[in-house]
Image (cartoon, rainbow, N blue to C red):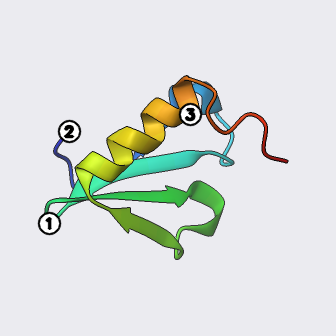
Amino acid sequence: MSSQHWQKSSYSGATNECMEVRTADGLVEVRESDEGETILRTNPTTFAALLHGLKTGEFDHHT
């Protein structure tokens, strides 16, 4: 992934309530589209580990 433009989740449809992601300066940036000034920055390895944990249900038991 290499983009300076925010990518919106395909699950969001036409709404403005979704997560967006992009890469910038070798980091992965994530934000919520309706709160664009708050950006989480991390390295690609950590982001990949987060995605893996989400996909495998690692965080499903947290409420």
Query: Which residue is depicted at the point 55% across and 23% down?
Result: 56
Q: Earlier in the sequence, mark 3 or mark 1?
A: 1
Q: Residues within 10 Å of mark 1 (few under 14, many from 20)?
A: few
Q: Which residue is mark 3?
A: 54
Residue 9 at x, y percent in the picture: 51, 34
Query: Which residue is depicted at the point 14% across and 60% down?
Result: 26
Residue 21 at x, y percent in the picture: 40, 49
Mark 3 vs mark 1, foreground winner is 3
- Spatial CA distance of label 3 from label 2 is 19 Å
Residue 14 at x, y percent in the picture: 64, 34
Q: Which residue is mark 1?
A: 25
Q: Which residue is mark 2?
A: 1
Q: Earlier in the sequence, mark 1 or mark 2?
A: 2
* Observer-nearest of 28 and 36: 28
Identified by mark 1, the residue type is Asp
- Quick one: which residue is furthest to the bottom in this view? 37
Query: Which residue is depicted at the point 45% across and 36% down?
Result: 51
Identified by mark 3, the residue type is Leu
Give the total of numbered labels.
Answer: 3
Quarter of the image with the N terminus in it: top left
Asked which secondary structure carries label 3, the reply is helix
- Spatial CA distance of label 1 from label 2 is 12 Å
Q: Residues within 10 Å of mark 2 (few under 14, many from 20)?
A: few
